Amino acid sequence: MDASWAPLSISEAARRFADHDVDWWVAGGMAIDHFLGWESRPHDDLDLEMYRSDRDVLFDVFEGWDLHRMSESELAPWRRGDPLPDTAFAIWVRPSPSDAWSVELMLADGDEDTWRYRRNPSITLPRSQLTATSKDGVAYCVPEVQLLYKAKQARPKDDVDLARCLPHLSTTQKEWLRAGLATMHPDHPWIAVLDMSTWVSTEER
């Protein structure tokens, strides 16, 4: 799989989505940056997210571009009118087959009221609480949800993301993340970190 990247800027993504009445937001490490209010580390790609039910608008947002669906680590061309398998969890986009990838659109599950975690639909959040808006008006995935996604791999950079977010997370956010980790990864080392952080916060009151 060719994974070379020339990521689109967020401002260009916003320009392309501006004429389309769908929700979209920044995901991945850049979502953490928007929560913190500063760029915590360089990013080689651009992860955005939108609801699965809105995915067909991508053919208009990126009209004439090369779209592929990602399913179980396999990329396959996705063209207007093609069905999208339930196993597909993202759409990769680039200007043409000879260009580097520009953006990965993650597909979120849920309905008009509720977001559901793709890896376990019993983990939910009200749709209105899934995103926040940065000072420059960009919608981004809230950190507790983004960290739950990151916990599956928990690479060193993900551990750093947790450490940077932790002082800024509310008790409610920490409790939601802890509950999600306990469901998905009951032996995850982040659980002890969250417990200690919550205890310290309580002691300081």
Image (spheres, rainbow, N blue to C red):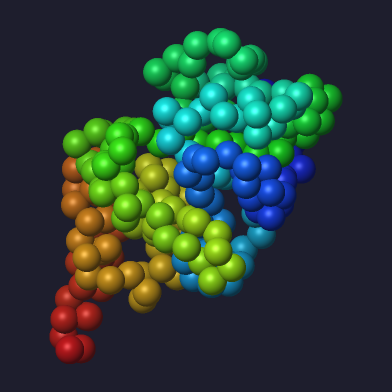
Tell me residue 81's x, y (percent). 57, 11
Locate residue 93, reporting x and y percent.
67, 31
Which residue is rendered at x = 26% and y = 41% of the image? 114
Q: Is 156 displayed left or right of 197 in the figure?
A: right
Q: In this view, does 2 lie above or below 166?
A: above
Relative to residue 24, is residue 99 drawn left or right? Answer: right
* Residue 162 lies in quadrant: bottom left
- Residue 186 horizontal/vertical position (percent): 20, 46
**Residue that extends furthest to the right in the rendered view of this protein:** 98
Q: Is residue 1 placed above or below 203 in the rendered structure?
A: above
Q: Which residue is drawn at 63% across and 15% down?
A: 79
Q: Quadrant of residue 117?
A: top left
Res 159 seen here: no
Quadrant where the image shows the N terminus: top right
Left/right of residue 175 with respect to residue 145 in the rendered view: left
Q: Is residue 12 visible?
A: yes
The quarter of the image holding the C terminus is bottom left
Q: Nearer the viewer, residue 121 or 110?
A: 110
Q: Position of residue 65 (x, y in %)?
A: 74, 26
Q: Nearer the viewer, residue 94 or 178?
A: 94
Relative height, residue 68 to residue 35 (above, below): above
How many labels were placed on the picture? Answer: 0
- Residue drawn at point x = 65 percent, y = 34 percent: 61
Residue that sits furthest to the top in the current view? 82
Q: Closest to the observer: 205 or 22?
A: 22
Q: Residue at x 22, y 65 (%)?
A: 172
